[in-house]
Image (cartoon, rainbow, N blue to C red):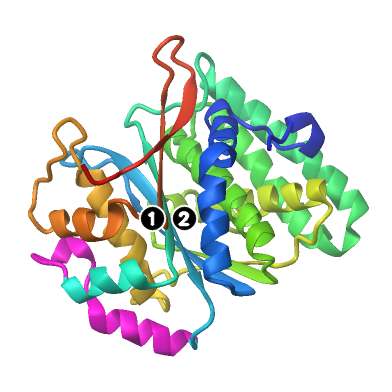
Amino acid sequence: MSNSPSEIGYRLFPAIEDFQETFEKSAAQSLARFFVEAPARKWMVFSDYAFYDPQKQSDVFVLSLVPYVVEFDALSAHIQGLSFKDIKHLRRVNPEFIEYLRRAPIANIAVLLPRDRRLVNGDEKGAIIDFFSGLEAMIEKWHESTPQGNTYHTLFLKDLKHLRWLVQFSQANLRLLRDSILVASITGYVLFRAVQMADAELIGWFSDRDALLSYQSKKLHLPLIYQLLNTYYHALCEKAGQPGDNLVLGLPEEVGPVFYDSFLRVPDLVAATMADLNFSDLSFTHPKFGPIMDDLLLSNEKCIFFALRKNPIDGTPEAVRHTLERG
């Protein structure tokens, strides 16, 4: 299931297109079985990141899919009782929390990224400029066809012109732009397919605080990653002929506790473990990660792992699926 840029007006960089093809070849079946076993019409997806830590083996971001079948505050309190801190502040993870996640109707999708990642071989800056130009053309078309969204379209077009100017005059943080495009595009696709598989009437994405959310915050009317995710999700829905008004994006508070903080313990646990994993000898820098791998991640169809990497032959970005099985 691929989506041509010419059809939806949203450029798909090689790694993203390859991710979607890899997802459909194998992971889609696992996720579809999960939704059959955990039927729900409303879903929450929580994200956490482990990026650019020189003491870690990999960069990772995780999407944790949680059904909205239990009252929000009650489920939040239950998770808080099982794990009251981020894993980096814990010497040992509560075994009951790991057991709960193994049994719970929660799926985790982890994407490992190379530290030296790029969107394309060659002129990446030019490719990003073309990407923003294509988005501008699509938003202008939507501006004409859906006048009820004109205020949002006008603000987004202003943001895109600002970002394109930054790239053209070498004022942009390419690392944050690159990661915003990668995370937003992959997340948007997963949310789109989750809605199709679960026949969901509502899906929400809730991210932990990260530099991705605050980039150019004084110049943009919304974080870029939110605008990109929202745009790609709607482009996919438009192409599939399905409603696109069932997406909710939760903005974390700028300071203090995040209202969904306890739920972030789930992707935090998976991201930290996968970032610390040394694939050459399957070792960790701290013993707290061992039980998470053994009792949660290994041989668990609800935990799906991908890696973006450079093709060993021509160096083009591509995606592969990792399977973690006992033995």
Q: Crowdedness of circle 1 by 10 Å Cα count: few (<14), some, many (20+)?
A: few
Find disc 2 in the rendering and name its residue.
Answer: 213
Q: Quadrant of residue 294?
A: bottom left
Q: Quadrant of the C terminus?
A: top left
- 126 with respect to 275 (left or right): right
Find disc 1 in the rendering and name its residue.
Answer: 210
The kind of residue on which mark 2 rests is Leu
Residue 75 in magenta stretch = yes
Counting from the top left corner in percent of width and height, residue 194 is at 61, 58
Counting from the top left corner in percent of width and height, residue 122 is at 51, 13
From which residue to which does the magenta span run? 72-93
Q: Secondary structure at mark 1?
A: loop
Please tell me which residue lies in front, 280 or 314.
280
Identify the residue shown where x is 44% and y is 14%: 315
Identify the residue shown where x is 60% and y is 56%: 191
Q: Would you say the magenta stretch is mainly helix, strand or loop?
A: helix
The kind of residue on which mark 1 rests is Asp
Q: Secondary structure at mark 2?
A: helix
Residue 302 in magenta stretch = no
Mark 2–mark 1 CB contact (< 8 Å): yes
Identify the residue shown where x is 21% and y is 37%: 57
Q: Quadrant of the N terminus?
A: top right
- 175 with respect to 159 (left or right): left
Counting from the top left corner in percent of width and height, residue 147 is at 90, 59
Label 2 – label 1 distance at C-alpha:
6 Å
- Residue 251 against residue 232 in the figure, above or below: below
Identify the residue shown where x is 75% and y is 47%: 235
